[in-house]
Amino acid sequence: MRAGRWRGIASQVGRSVAVWAVSTVTLLILAGLLPDFRLRSADGDSATDIAVTAAFGAGAFGLLSALVWPLLVRLLLLVPALVLGLLVFALNGALLLLALRLNPGERGAAAPETAVVVAAVMSAVASATGAALAVRDDDAYRRRLYRLADRRRRRLPPGPATPGTLFLQLDGVGHDVLVDAVGKGLMPTVARWLGTGDEPGNARPSHRLTPWRTDWSSQTGASQLGILHGSTFDVPAFRWYEKDTQEVMVSNRPTSAAELQRRAVARTGDGGLLTFDGASRGNLFGGGADEQALVLSIATRRRSRENRSRAGYFAYFSDPANAVRTALSFVAEVGREIGQSTRSRFRKERPRVSRGGLYPFIRAFATVVERDVVVAAVMGDMLAGRTAIYADLVAYDEVAHHSGPFSRDAEKVLQRLDRSLALIEKVAEHAPRPYRVVVLSDHGQSPGETFRARYGLTLGDLVRAGCGLPVPRRARRTHSGAEARAAVRAALRIPVEEDAERHRPGRRSEPIVLASGNLGLISFPDVPHRMSKEEIDARHPALLSTLANHPGIGFLLVRSERHGGVVLGAYGTEIPVDKLDDRPGPLAAFGPGAAAAVRRAHTFPHAADIMVNSFHDPADGEVLAFEEQIGSHGGLGGAQSRPFLLFPLALSAPVADGEEIAGAEHVHRVLRRWLREADGPQVPVDRVPVDRVAVDEVAVDQVPVDQVAAGRAPTEQVPVERIPVDRTAVDDSRSEAPGDAPFAAPDPTAQDKTV
């Protein structure tokens, strides 16, 4: 035992000396190449003096990076995270200048701009050398991981190591896209899990792949809210207008995300999927986790001790090698996007959307910074032995919006995501408990031209024409619904209230037209209730027929005084929503489940006056996005409604043979059951009503139902700030009922029932 420890110390010292030597040589080479960087005094020095100066400078720079950099990053936590990443070079340059000044012989000097370059090269070389030596020394690599894991293992109570669960969301990756990528060899890690790869030993799969079907609103806001909090009720789209508050809700706006999470918790009475010993990383919603980082719903203007949205940035950027590597990769990704978009323009590829402005930087943030930070946070959670982890990687979704879901650009992102999966799998081997890795997506993406590109006008222009209002000669572009844009704004700490949309109704005010992928929502703000077909026809006789008969429109949903709700299509088609199963009409092209999804959306209190779904071609899966995206999601039609669930064979089948997973709420119930199967901290199934006066919206006691029934609810699992409730009437018999109808309209009076 003692000999092994000494071997480990000797190995570490050897690697440190090797890195020091390589850094010294690098410093000497840079001094010879750069005119504003020298390692000798003004009078000149011998070769020995110059070498000693280089060795001293390299050693001092390494020590300062190891000791001062973490403190410097912590002091700079008030600086926006993205800005901190861009300041990496300047901070490293300052450390190098300080290292040169510490030389007792007063040799060595550099211009500030040259010091930035030298420090960046030094950090990159030291990081690459250390990583190469660690990879070649498997024992050292394992010992380093075990040291990190032991910090948590010593605090765990003795007993069997129950498995933890990692839920990793690949945002926007559809089932068909994943299957295609595996078939092309782009994702060898996933192929090995499925037993379909070319490598030896792949004959025995460890995972199983199955698709699931989204609600009508096929976007992250609805899907992730349902997956993490068990409710997608009254989330009709990515953005929608609420007449009672006169505001537009936007799923990726922090204030809206916080409100949606509060409503879901109030409706289900359940804090979320991650209530016990959970971690939420890079998500729109917290899921009830105690550990949250890069979570949009807590990134609001009001700051508090509980607001830890940027904690993950410190954990990652405290290592200068990580900071430099990510900064360099960020710059490379910006250049890659500029090159790819230029090539697309020169080749006159179609369809194509604008990719200029700030988009290259937003893409680089999503594909580099967000990915690196989230993956590092997940690895830290696994080495800490957390019970349940849910993380979202938005890289593919952002690129596919602008390049297309099956494009070469998007395929490159899938390759890098697969490498992240391989890295996470490797770290799981050294965690203090076994981990079951579940990979899933929240929606897919459907390809196709934009509505504006095909017809020369936006949905808003068409609505104005149908209302007899003047149409602007130059059509306006719609806002993007990509999640990465909001993540960048949160990282930059731009106040979210600045672009909050508030509409004050006036007399005969114009309609509000909002786009969510290929789903459009039309509302009349001066009417306090949801207008009926009869009321719309009386006010604008040509509007509904103009929309329904347009070749770019698939169908409309409106309220009807006679039928309750009707679906409208071309040539005067009008079908009551309760007759859609027998007469699907225009919904036939959208496949099974479309009628149930439309019926459910019709029950939402905040459904728009007119819900519009674009045309869909089932032959090639294309839709027409009302936003400027050639890979879109948000409505019905094509691959956007068909995400995937990739889970270990050790877990029970999500549904019986012949059935399908229908809706994000159904996925929530499946994931909750898998957590219970792990025999760890349980996710509550139901709650009795509690008095919520003066109680925080998520501060509800979350003791597992099965432990309550057994009379052994451990008080140490209940956070001290939560308020105990009477558990005598708790019953979870309804949660796993085989007859659960995912699209059944909930009882509006049952506010504390799990849906």
Image (cartoon, rainbow, N blue to C red):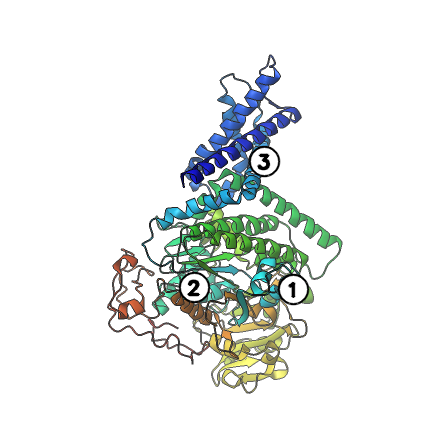
Task: Name the residue type under label 2.
Answer: Leu
Viewer-nearest residue: 733 or 88 = 733
Give the spatial CA distance, label 2 vs label 1. Answer: 31 Å
Task: Compare residues 263 and 605 and report the one nearer the observer.
Answer: 263
Question: Which residue lies at the image location 57% right of the left edge and 51% below the top edge?
Answer: 367
Q: Which circle marks residue 739 in the picture? A: none
Q: Earlier in the sequence, mark 2 or mark 1?
A: 1
Residue 517 vs residue 674: left or right?
right
User: In this figure, which residue is indicated by the disc labeled 2?
Assistant: 228
Type of the residue with mark 3: Val
Per the image, label 2 sits on a secondary structure element best described as helix
Query: Which of label 2 and label 1 is nearer to you?
Result: 1
The residue wearing badge 1 is 183
> Element type at marker 3?
helix
> Crowding at label 3, few (<14), some or many (≥20) Cα neighbours within 10 Å?
some
CA gap between label 3 and label 1 equals 36 Å
**Left or right of residue 592, residue 74 in this image:** left
